[in-house]
Amino acid sequence: MLESGQIPNPTTRSIAALGWDALTRNDPDLGALLDAEARYQTASLSMVASASVAPPSVLCANGTVLSNVTAEGYPGARYHPGAAHFDEIETLAVERAKRVFGAQFANVQPHSCSSANLAVMGALLPRGGRILALDLDSGGHLTHGAGASVSGKYYDVAHYGVARDGNLDYGTILDRALAHRPDVIIAGASAYPRWLDFPRFRAIADRVGAYLLADISHIAGLVAAGLHPSPIDYAHITTTSTYKQLAGPRGGLILLGKDHRRTAPDGRTELWKQMQRAVFPGFQGTPDPSSIAAKARALAIASSGAFQSTMKRVVDNAKALSDELVTLGYDVLTGGTDNHMVLVDVRAAGLTGIVAERALEQCGILVNRNKIPGDPHPPTVGGGLRFGTNILAQRGMGPFEVRACAGIVHDVLSGIRVRDAGHYELDGALRDAARDRVNALCARFPLRFDDE
Ligand code: DSN
């Protein structure tokens, strides 16, 4: 006699169905909030550059009985019993990560790219060791030595910035490296619209005897699709998050190319082994088997022709967005883009980033405020907006529709009456008209829930 909730021969499908049934019946408040979020996402025009939409098979793989598996260690060398299936799944994820990025080694356990970066730093740097990385205000990342991050507190950090035109100046980076003599140079950005020249970064790293860490979190999809030069064989170590452009679960990867067998800073161990130890037991305990299964699924999708086509549209759309914003009179940093990102200095339009972000959000357009080089505003205010085209491309929009998006953005930004750096008024009729146009575009291009 089965008790309620018992499933004699459980499958992923039957457990998920039971789960949704139980959630909506026993926790309707939470169920309603989750449904509301799904509707909100399809009715919003998201141009958040660090986001993409995970296909349902990825979401499904991320919510399975694997969450019940506790298994520290790596496939074949666990500290807990019962990990045979998880071993196979983790091995699958590792092999897929290596194939997608042309890597010799992959560690798929980091809970995020932040964790991956900190694990790499822990492995490569002595206490108080020296880092050289892109300044947060110039488009860097918190874990690249920003003062608020442990990477900035525990290491001796020097930063490089961008030139007045917004581009990286490799001569200045070399000068900074010669002056600071870093142990690790980081090539990677959260807000930089141009290609990163990994061979030049490597030449600088070799000149000063530093390791080169490439953090490709924002451009991982373009790298996977061959639309941005790959750092894998130039950087000693490459890290990425799996959700920003790979449309995967929350999580990170560590990848090594031709230097994977090079001796690590301890003088004995090969780099790949040092990375394994750095993640577990160095920085994390138990891995998250569910997110590793979801990474395996996302990496399979990332090697498909459909994913490549989407990434091509991402780049075409970003160029169209940037061209249109320039035509409309906006100050687009570096004058354009090579990737999925468009950075706009909104100060010339009499705005701050926060005011522009909030007014757009009122109309169903999601774009985040960002500091821009030389910005006097704190990060909570920002003088710029960072646009990204990942989700527009995933929805199937092309340059024509993206120009229409730029037009709506322009109409909203032009209608803002600024009261001070953080406050504004937006005419209700203007807001409703913009919202109607957003609704129409979103209805024509709903979020696509297919995956191949
Ligand atoms: N680094 C943040 C961003 O670029 O939006 C998200 O992780």
Image: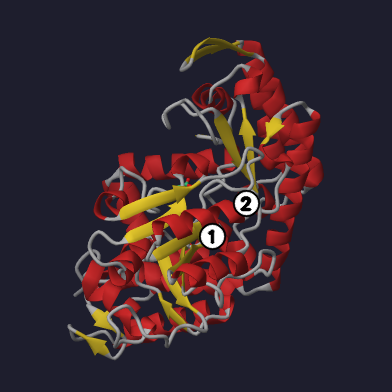
Q: Residue drawn 78% across and 27% down? A: 328
Q: What kind of colouring is applied to the model shown?
A: secondary structure
Front residue of 147 and 190? 147
Q: Position of residue 343 (x, y in %)?
A: 62, 39
**Residue 44 visible in the displayed image:** no
What residue is disc 1 on?
247
Q: Residue drawn 40% across and 50% down? A: 158
Q: Residues within 10 Å of mark 1 (few under 14, many from 20)?
A: many
Front residue of 367 and 393? 367
Circles 2 and 1 in contact, beta carbons < 8 Å = yes
What residue is disc 2 on?
390
**Residue 441 visible in the displayed image:** yes
Q: Residues within 10 Å of mark 2 (few under 14, many from 20)?
A: many
Q: Position of residue 255 (x, y in %)?
A: 46, 75
In the rendered image of this protein, does residue 267 appear above or below residue 44? below
Q: Quadrant of residue 147?
A: top left
In the rendered image of this protein, does residue 404 appear above or below residue 150? above
Amino acid at pointer 2: Asn
Left or right: residue 11 versus residue 299 is: left
Q: Label 2: state its secondary structure.
A: helix
Q: Position of residue 112 (x, y in %)?
A: 37, 60
Q: Position of residue 232 (x, y in %)?
A: 55, 74
Q: Quadrant of the N terminus?
A: bottom left
